[in-house]
Image (cartoon, grey):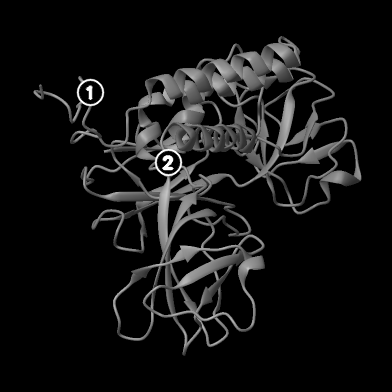
Amino acid sequence: MIVKSENNLHIGAPHTYLSNAEQGTTVLRWKNPSGFSPSWAIQIGETGNEQSEVRVLSTGNPSGGTAGTVTSATSYEHPADTLVYAIKYDQVVFERNTGGTTGGTSAPMTDGTITYQADHSFTQFDDTSGSASYGYRVRFRNSVSGSQTSLSDWVLSPGFSFYSLAEIRQRSKDKMWDATFIQDDLVWDRWTNEFKDKLTNAAIQVNEDYSLGTVDVGFGTDGLGTVTTGDFKQPRRVWVKYGGNDFVESTKQESNDDFPNRTYVSTQPQHYWFGNDIIQVKPEESGGTARIMFYSQGTTMVNDTDELPRYMRGYTDGFVDYNLIQAQYKDGKMTMSEKKTAEMSLIREFTGQLTPRDKSGADRIEIVEAISGDDGLI
């Protein structure tokens, strides 16, 4: 079972350049090692280059001069002006859980701590006793200080799903004219979430049954309750129950329609809203629960394994195209007007292809011929 970890430590890392050609040496002459620290790992060369390699700095201050010392000699020839990154970590620790991704914890595998393979785009480990049902996670580690990063998201052996954040990001990179043009993966992720928000709003305009959620909100004797769920956008319907009674539908009213001597009954509750997320239920009685159906803005995709909502999964190419549009605009290959036109075209294509929410039965009965009460009379 081959398990892979992306080599991305150079992204956003402090860097400098060799001031002279170096080969087989423990002393690297460089230009400006600002941001480099003692005992940190450094990467000499770009990720994926055949002669790129990783070494660990000595305990001396690397920013104190025009040369830095590494604990073991370099193996390859590196010309002047070769990039040198302060990546800090020189190892990848592979962990697994034989119960899959639901077991909660993982443990480092025997011989699963691997030197960071900077001459490839990923570091890999062959889990010879692995299984397709196992869950895997990785972390980066510094072999000298023992410091390490937090664990990555869970990954099953088949890799990330086609609808995941990681897969959309990688497909966007694969279609770029230069895969390293956008070095920070967070940029890709922000663009993906930005387009996801646009499609959420577009889907609701097509059919209000899309992107709905429900939440129960308790209210006290003052009738006030606060919606705290993070994806709440705005309410659609409200039901109310008092004590052990059943839920009954509540009628929305305007706050101006409420006045001190107005009478309300619990069998026909009413409600109105304060600001964005505070509901006022009438009558208050002894408190109760408001069940709110709401338009959901969705949760932000953060983890590599996070997936698109189901109704967007048939449009993954739109996300990739949207990311490429943003990259082209950033690179000056597209004007703002062209960018907006291209974005609107993607949204129109999505709404045109969006499947109706529920076509399981007839929506209405159409009268082909008008019915008249005079038919058949003389």
Residue 127 in picture, x, y percent from top left: 29, 43
Q: Is residue 160 left or right of residue 33?
A: left
- The residue tagged 1 is 370
Q: Is residue 52 left or right of residue 86?
A: left
Q: Quadrant of the C terminus?
A: top left
Residue under the point 36% across and 60% down: 107
- Dot 2 amino acid type: Glu
Identify the element where label 1 is drawn. Answer: loop
Q: How many neighbours does mark 2 have within 10 angstroms: few (below 14), some (14-19), or many (20 or more)? A: few
Residue 279 in picture, x, y percent from top left: 56, 69
Residue 109 in picture, x, y percent from top left: 34, 54
**Front residue of 298 and 300:** 298
- Dot 1 amino acid type: Ala
- The residue tagged 2 is 208
Q: Quadrant of the N terminus?
A: top left
Residue 83 in picture, x, y percent from top left: 74, 26
